Image (cartoon, rainbow, N blue to C red):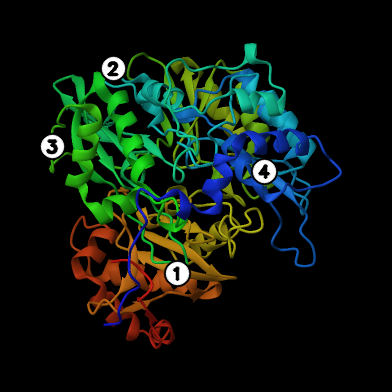
Amino acid sequence: MSEKKPFEPNFQTPQEDLCKEELNKLNAPAVHKQFFDQIRDDSVEDYVWEVEQIAKSSGIYLEFDRSIKDAKNWTCMIRIANPGGGPINREQWNLLDELSDKYAVNPHTNLPSIRLTNRQTVQFHWVTKAGVRDVVKSVAEKGLNSLNGCGDNTRNVMAPPMSRFSTVFNAIEWSHKIGNYFQLPMEPWMTVFGIDPDKVRVPGESFAYPKNLLNRKFKIALGAFIQDAQTGKLVADNAAELRSNDLGISPILNGNKVEKVQIYVGGGQGERNGKPSTAALGQALCIVELNKLLEVADAIVKVHAEFGDRQNRHWARLKYVIKKMGIEWYRDQVSAKLGYPLEKADPHHDIGDRQLYFGWNKQENSDLLSYGMYIENGRVIDDGPNGQLKSLVRHIINTYDVELMITPNQDLLFNNIPAAQKDAFEATLKEFHYGQRNGKAYSTLRMHSGACVGRDTCRLTYTDSEKFEPELIDELENLGWNDIPESIGITGCERQCFRPATKTIGLIGTGLNRYQFKLMGDETGRFQGVPLIDSSGENMYLRSVAREDVAKIIDILFKFYKDNAQDGESLGAYHRRVGADAIIAHLKNNPISSAYMEKPFNTATIID
């Protein structure tokens, strides 16, 4: 087997080894002065590198359209921090809708849109510099901060949205507590954008960020419980895919009470091409009393801020500290920060399945209903194929006395609907032709699948994802796979923002119109998908499949599963049972896929 590149992160990085991004953060006061000046200079479309880096913590990414080769037409993406997906009230949604009409207009189609994300928040794309000032200031003064939207800090805290109505554990309430606690200092942000301090939500006690913030982004998610529609029993709800985060918090049910939570650390899906890196699910760290959750979370983040690599950004996430030092070591470090030993985790604890909430849901604490609306790839737009979604959402929020929440699957949840209004609500959906793509009812496969934005909206991506996914599902539906209860996740690059490898089949862009397959994941969201590597550990297959062949390969995998699966066995479970070698052998023997099996990719640049 080929020798792998050494995995040697630089923990507790000395000052002389700090990368340029870390040095830039240490110079933040001067850079914020530049930021103040440049955000007001409309004569230049972009920002200097130093400002571009600092701006990320304000929810701003500098972008350009990668489909235009001759020039970089600079615009910005703005991401709002929206803990737990909301709730978002009528006034706030109307503001988001109006701002999207004004600033978030696709130059190729001239159509405005709002992009929901699988971190339960909102993104605006194609925003000019003048628009950035207006968007950030306007939403902040309506209670929706962009601070912590991006950057080397904690990101938007996720939680299962239906837990807002739980009688045993309100994960939404906790997502707001945690989000407020890890809120960045607000004064520089308010100064840069001229935000009225009397109109923003200011946290109380908060985390003491180091001068150079965190090593990289730090993601936090909670689990919850939901009533099973068939049995009425409480089951664990892992809508937020908590183990895919740096810090995952799963409640422990004791009778009808939650007094403790189990904590997982070291999850993260992003990788870097050409760098030894890996995607991983978090490992079980400890059990914590609920009243000590914030202080334990504080210590977990502090240990990572102290030890995590600040020289090599591809190794700066918490998962690499866990990989190098081990979960026991990390527990000891957190215990030392706290001054007391942590209770070891329960290896049999169940985090639950990925819940999606489509259709009608009973609110546990009342007689009111919630309605889960599928939004293909989170794009709220009046575009034709999916009907008039943007107009529909605006009509609902202004007609019914409801609040909105965004789900971890990039969909919408409308809350507080009286049972007496159910028929009228369904009539509204039909009026706007909701539930169909090009006149054809949404399939199970489509509603369980999704993608990140991809080209030409993100400068990091190599290829289409959001634009490819609907076409791929169309093709698979034409092959007869409408109602297969599985999921396909697509991202335009190896950052894997949609978490494709936790779905049944993950597709990761590796080049223009080229995709890598990741298998062994599952529709339940419980398992980490991996590249298709043989038992030697040296040969990786389906590393770069042409766009026009992706549906053909999936069709082969679906048929292989249907012909050989055991009763009740999901596709992911089937793949895990038969193993990579059996899948590889089947693909080699199929005339359609055999060409992709002739020259495997050497695995020497990845971490085991």
Percent of width and height locating residue 378:
55, 43
* Residue at numbered disc 2: 167
The amino acid on which the numbered mark 1 sits, given as a three-letter code, is Gln
Q: Position of residue 136 (x, y in %)?
A: 67, 30
At x 55%, y 74%, the residue is 548
Q: Which mark is residue 344?
A: 3
Secondary structure beneath disc 1? strand
The extreme front residue here reads: 16
Crowding near the residue tagged with mark 2, few <14, some 14–19, many ≥20 C-alpha atoms within 10 Å: some
Identify the residue under disc 1.
516
Q: Nearer the viewer, mark 3 or mark 4?
A: 4
Give the residue drawn at x 30%, y 24%.
295
Number of the label disc, if any, that sits on residue 51: 4
Q: Secondary structure at mark 3?
A: loop
| CA distance separating discs 2 and 3 | 27 Å
The reply, left or right, for residue 352 in relation to residue 162 is left
Q: Pick whichever of labels 2 and 4 is earlier in the sequence.
A: 4
Question: Nearer the N terminus, badge 2 or badge 3?
Answer: 2
SS state under label 2: loop
Instruction: Identify the residue shown where x is 44% and y is 27%.
Output: 179
Kind of residue sitting beneath label 2 = Thr
Choose top left, top right, bottom left or bottom right for residue 597: bottom left
Q: Residue at x 18, y 62 (%)?
A: 566
Q: Percent position (x, y) of residue 56?
A: 59, 41
Circles 2 and 4, Cβ within 8 Å, touching? The answer is no
Horizontal relation, residue 156 to residue 28: left or right = left
Q: Amino acid at mark 4?
A: Val
- The answer for how far apart the CA atoms under marks 1 and 3 are is 37 Å
For discs 2 and 1, the disc positioned in front in the rendered view? 1
Label whose residue precedes the other's in the sequence (2 or 1):
2
- Helix or strand or loop: what does disc 4 sit on? helix
Disc 1 versus disc 3: nearer the observer: 3
